[in-house]
Structures are given as structure tokens and as C-alpha cells.
Amino acid sequence: MASVAVMLLAITLILGLRIGDVPEVAERARVAKNAGDEARYLELKERSDAGVLALSNHRIFAIGVAIFVLFVNSMSITYFVGTSRWCREVGETYALDHNFAEQAQSYKRRNFPWALLGMLTVLFIAGFGAASDWSVDGDVERAARWAMPHLVSACVGLGIMVVAFYFQALKLHEQGNHIARIMDEVARIRKERGLSD
């Protein structure tokens, strides 16, 4: 799911790059219309309308992707909450060494900052996107000031998300191996006690 999230973030970035400089084109179209240059106005209006459509597509897609990225990071946290509790309960049930439960907690604590970083990154990108959205209040100058920070935050954020998901995947793998060790220990104890599998 992390790979899908990164791919969707990259697609969102590409959709954003295809928008172009819509606020400036819209402003030039307005000036041409006021100046009575109908041909120039129609040309710029067509470009502006295409850009507005691209902006709409980018905005809607980006909202969906942001929710998905938040969901993937939340799943990572939920997995560690559940499995660390499971490790503790199994350890208590079979009187395992306390290190099993402590190690599971350690993996959970080391995963959490990466998941939180992923969540905050996507919110940071979305915040810059909202600041650069000129269609809400028509403030073209403000939108122009925030367009480049939004682009930079999206590019940097994509890199941060790749790193955050990579480290979460490593922690998930470590936790999976840890659970396998617990299961081996439980199987050994059950066999010693003559219990069925």
C-alpha cells in the first residue's frame, strides 16, 4: 500500500505540474477583455479554462491521495498497537521472557515517528496547496506567492514520504520476524506440554 501511496503522490505532482500558470493567464484574459481585444481574450480564456479544469482535477485527486496516505500511515500505527499488545498477551499466557513484549514495544516506538512524519508531511503539502488555491477567493497575487512553495513542498514531501514508508516497512518486517520467533517459542512450549497444534 505504501508503494501505491507513493505512486499516487507522484501522479498528483504530475497533475499539478500540468496546471501551468492559471492565475496569470486568467488575469491576462481579464485585462484583454477590458481592453476590448476579443481575439486575445478568447485565446487566453480557453487556456485559462483548460488550466482551471486541470486545477480542479489536481485538487480533487490530491484530496483523495492525502486521505489515502493518512490511512496507510494510520494502518502502520494500528498494526504496531495490535501486534505489540498481542505479543504481551501471548507472553503472559505462555510465561515467556519479558524481553519478547519489550522488543515488540520497542519496534512500535521506533515506527511511530516515521508514521507521524508521513502524516504531517502530507498535511504540510496540502496546506501549501490550499494557500496557493486562487479559485477560492480570486486572490491571484497571493496564489502566485504560494505556488512555488507548494511545488517545492510537494517535491521534498514526496522524497520524505519515500523515506518514511521505507523505514516503516523495515519496522514492519522486524515486527513480523519477532512475531515468528514468538510463534516458534509458543510451538516449542506447546509441544513440551503435549498440547495439540
Image (spheres, helix red, strand yellow):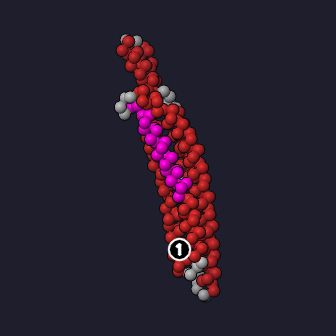
In the visual, does 80 lie left or right of 180? left
Report helix, strand or loop for mark 1: helix
146 or 87, nearer to the observer: 146
Residue denoted by label 1: 88
Q: Residue 158: image x %, image y %?
A: 56, 43
- Residue shown at 49% from the left, 36% from the top: 150
Give coordinates of residue 43: x percent, y percent. Answer: 45, 18
Q: Determine the residue located farthest toward the top in the rendered image.
A: 36
| Residue toward you, 77 or 14 | 77
- Classify the position of the C terminus by image quarter: bottom right
Q: In this rendering, does residue 53 appear at all? A: no
Q: In this view, does 105 lie above or below 67?
A: below
Rendered location of residue 129, percent (x, y): 45, 38
In the displayed structure, would residue 167 be above or below residue 179?
Answer: above
How many discs mark residues in the rendered view?
1
Neighbours of disc 1 within 10 Å: few (<14), some (14-19), many (20+)? many
Tell me which corner region of the image, top left, top right, bottom left or bottom right, holds residue 46: top left
Residue at 48 percent across and 27 percent down: it is 21
For the stretch drawn in magenta, the main secondary structure is helix
Q: Residue at x 53, y 55 (%)?
A: 113
Could you say where residue 94 lies in the image, as x and y percent from the top left?
A: 56, 81
Q: Does residue 116 appear in this view?
A: yes
Q: Is 151 in the magenta? A: no
172 vs 67: above or below? below
Q: Over which residues does the magenta segment extend?
A: 112-135
Q: Which amino acid does label 1 sit on?
A: Arg
Q: Residue at x 52, y 51 (%)?
A: 117
Instruction: Verify whether residue 129 appears in magenta.
Output: yes
